[in-house]
Image (tube, rainbow, N blue to C red):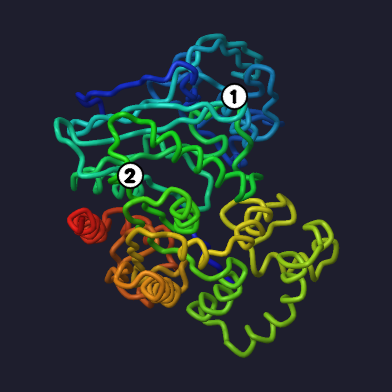
Amino acid sequence: MIRIFVLIIAILSCQQQVFAQHIKRRGTLGVGFYQKLPDSLQQQLAYKQGAVIQFTQPGTTAAGLGIAANDILTRINNISVVKPSDIFTAAKSLREGDRIEVSLIRNKKTVILKGTVAGRPRETSTTADIVYGEFAYKKGYIRTIYKTLKGKKPLGTIYFLQGLPCYSMDNFKEGDMTKQALDAMVDRGFAVYRMEKADMGDNVNMPPCETMGFNEELEMYIAGYKNLLTLKEVDTSRIFLFGHSMGGLTAPLLAEKYQPRGVVVYGTVFKPWMDYLLDAFLIQSQYFGEDLAVLRDNLEKVKPYIYDYFYGNKTEAQVAETPDGIAALSAITGYDAATGLAASGRALLCHKELNQHNMARAWKNTNGYVLAIYGECDIAANNADDHQALISYVNKIHPGKGTFWQAPGTTHLFEEIGTMEEFVRWQSNPVAFAQYAATRFNPKVFDYACNWMKSVLDKS
């Protein structure tokens, strides 16, 4: 099977400020459950449907309710839990302080438990101040988080733009690579501003991330920039964008509109999005042993369907109405006919709308300085070519304003692993790779990026 990597993935003393009055903290259920129930346990519990609990986490809603291992959860408030994944749907509606009622089967008897929803823990730090903010957007509210070193005026503010997958930007687990990236920039003297997209995190009354198109997501990030400009602690003449992965496509679309001091992109795309996907099919597949001649033959077979969707008038449903159409969408975009979602768990619409934007024009209209970083073993970004092409174009239009740097041995997620070949070998044992990579965050990426931003600030 061809694998395509698409741009994507303790109690401390702290000063933590929460000025928002409209957003209630997202609740945390705090259970682990079996995705696939062992046969022995299925017999023992006489399981028919629901979610069988493996454990509960201390300090969470489940712990407060008294939910225990081997309980079969069948209902959360008015939402039935027929299969384990239904827990995710039910948990999304939980908010801190709300009343909750769950129905479960314990020792083959129905039990009703009532209590209060506990909120997700907030991010804490002994070295940084963290401000939880919000802004009104359409008929709801969007969560923002602003982090800066205690007692120090920041050198500037970095607006961090995340990649394609749907994940919250709030209170990452210790060791998470995005958390380490954000903290690295704060530790080096910059304030970092980030926001939740779609219905992620604490956001209120926002559409689901999975089905949201890119244009709607972009509008949210534009609103986030407008909010950033209103913050009294922000020097608006010292704003930088940091676009990671797909965030590197969002970045120039914001930059041409608001003209920040500079833009950093890492592991991103310069060419049209459809062209990137077609390249990924050829380039990435060869690393996993596929023959180029066979790949090119296969690519020619799927191209008509891909062009019909990205440039023709055909809808997703029209392209996917034949097995060949489904196969084409699957090969190039990671489309899953069962879920209707493509790579990184996003709707095909997101990919189509990404392709509608002229990135070259956005960069042409960006007057600030630009740094493009490519990690040596960043397979998701295919290779360094697009980053180099971006900087070549920037310097052609705005001489001397573009810089390219290749981060030695570094992956798409800022892990220092080695060459591309070494990274590919690791993929045959993903569990071992995850354990190894967990301690391999590369701070040199952020040494370079932050030193570059400081040099930009020194220019005028």
Work out which residue is located at the far left of the displayed protein and give it: 151
Is the Cβ of the residue at disc 1 closer than 8 Å to that at disc 2?
A: no
Image quarter of the N terminus: bottom right
Horizontally, residue 345 falls left or right of residue 21, namely: right
Residue 303 appearing in the image:
yes
Work out which residue is located at the far front of the displayed protein and give it: 460
- Of 451 and 294, nearer the camera is 451
Horizontally, residue 137 falls left or right of residue 410, namely: right
Amino acid under disc 2:
Lys
Amino acid under disc 1:
Ser
Look at 17% across and 36% down and name the residue there: 153
- The Cα–Cα distance between marks 1 and 2, rounded to whole angstroms, is 25 Å
- Where in the figure is residue 437, as x and y percent of width and height? 32, 58
Would you place residue 257 above or below residue 420 in this image?
A: above
Element on which disc 1 rests: loop
Look at 53% across and 71% down and name the residue there: 271
Residue 16's quadrant in the figure?
top left
- Where in the figure is residue 418, as x and y percent of width and height? 29, 72
Q: Earlier in the sequence, mark 1 or mark 2?
A: 1
Rendered image: mark on residue 125: none
- Of 204 and 363, nearer the camera is 363
Look at 20% across and 59% down and name the residue there: 459
Look at 29% across and 45% down and name the residue there: 237
Disc 2 target residue: 179
Residue 175 appearing in the image:
no
- Where in the figure is residue 76, as x and y percent of width and height? 63, 20
Horizontally, residue 225 falls left or right of residue 70, namely: left
Residue 93's quadrant in the figure?
top right
Rendered image: mark on residue 93: 1
- Where in the figure is residue 142, as x and y percent of width and height? 50, 30
